[in-house]
Amino acid sequence: MKLGHIAAACLSLALGTSALAQQPTVLKIGYATSKESHYGVGSTVFCDEVEKGTQGRFKCQHFANSALGGEREQIEAIQLGTQDLVNTSTGPVGNFVPEVKIVDIPFLFRDYDHARKVMDGPIGQDILTKFPSKGIIALAWTENGFRHMTNSKRDIVKPSDAAGLKMRTMENKVHMDGYRTFGILPTPMAFPELFGALQQGTVDGQENPIPVILASKFSQVQKHLSLTGHVYSPALLLLSPKVWNKLSDADKKVFVDAAKKAAVAQRKKVNDDENNGIAQLEKDGMKVTKVVDGAAFREALKPAYAGYAKEFGADNIKKITDVQ
Ligand code: EAX
C-alpha cells in the first residue's frame, strides 16, 4: 500500500471513530398498529421528546404493525433486552405483573374520564411500581380505549345475541372469565394472527377499541359492530431495564416526562377516533349498533364479579369504582 493510501486509511478511521462517538443510541420501539394510529402517535411524541431532551443522544426506530411480533412476545423481548420499548395494551401484561389484572375487569370504569383519573392517580401509579421486580420498566399508562365487539353473524344488543359466537380475545384470563358469562366462546389469539382468522372464519368475531378496528381495517372482514364498550383497555409504555439502568438521573426524567406527553397525545388520538371513526366504519360498510343493553351485560357478568372479588378483593375493586 502506498503511503498516501495509508494516510487516507488512517484519516478515514479517525473520522469514522469520531463520527461513531456522536452516533445516537437507536431505541427499537414496537406496537401493534400503524404509525398513524393512536399507538404510533403516542410513540412518535415519546421519541421526539426523548430526542429533544437528550440533545439527540437517543432516537427511535419504529416497528409498527406488530413487526416485532405479538404483544406478549414483545414484552418478553423487553425483559431480555433484545427490544428497547413497547407501547402495548395490558392484554398479556397481567401474566407478567399480576397487579395489573384488576384494571382489566369488564365494566369497571364508567367512562374515559374515570379510567384516566384512576390510571393517573395513586392506584394506577402504584401499579407502575410493581414492574421493575419483574424485569420491566413501566414509564407511563398510555391508552388503547374502550373495547367494542365486531362479528360476521349478527347485531349484538344484549348478551344473548353474543351467546354462541366464537370470538377472539386477548391472552387475558380476566377478560375470558367475563366474556364467558355473556355466552361468548372466547378464543385467545395473538393480535398479528387476528385479521387472517377473521378472514378465514376461524373465529366469528373479535373485540377491540375503535382506533384498532380502524387501523386494522377490520371493516373488510367484519360486518357488525356493536358499541358495547364492555371493558376499558389500558396501555403502557414499557422500557427494557437494560436501557434504563444505564441512564443518568437527568435522562431518566427526560424519558418519564416524554412518556407522560406521549400518553396525552395517544389519548387525544383515541378521542378523535371515537368521535370520527364510527362514521368512517359505517362508510366502509359496517352495520353499527349504537344502543346496547348495558344493564343486561352487567347483570350477566355478576358470577364473574364474584370471582373477581375473590381474586382481587371487593374493597380494592370498590376503591376503583369510588373514584369520581
Ligand atoms: O393493543 O390484542 C389486541 O386486541 C390489542 O387490543 C391490540 O393489539 C392493540
Image (cartoon, grey):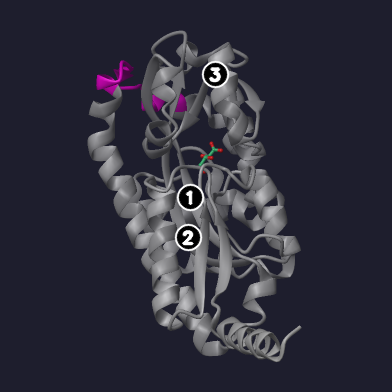
- How far is the residue under mark 3 from the one under mark 1? 24 Å
Q: Which residue is mark 1?
A: 234
Residue closest to the eye, 147 or 248:
248
> Would you say residue 290 is visible in this rendering?
no
Look at the numbered disc 1 and give the secondary structure of its residue. Answer: strand
Amino acid type assigned to the residue bearing label 1 in the image? Pro
Location of mark 3 (residue): 198
> Does 269 lie within the magenta span?
no
**Residue drawn at 33 percent across, 58 percent down:** 265
Q: Position of residue 189 (x, y in %)?
A: 65, 30
Quick one: which residue is furthest to the top in this view?
153
Q: Is residue 228 left or right of residue 303?
A: left
Q: Amino acid at mark 2?
A: Trp
For residue 16, above or below residue 271: below
Seen at 39% across and 72% down, the residue is 49
* Residue 296 lies within the magenta run: yes
Q: Which residues are magenta?
A: 282-297
Residue 139 position (above or below residue 162): below
Relative to 143, 95 lies left or right: right
Look at the picture and state if 205 lies above or below 133.
above
Q: Which residue is mark 2?
A: 141
- Mark nearer the N terminus (2 vs 1): 2
Q: Which of the 4 image quadrants contains residue 258? A: bottom left
> Circle 3: is it few (<14), some (14-19), or many (20+) Cα within 10 Å?
many
Tags 2 and 1 touching, CB below 8 Å: yes
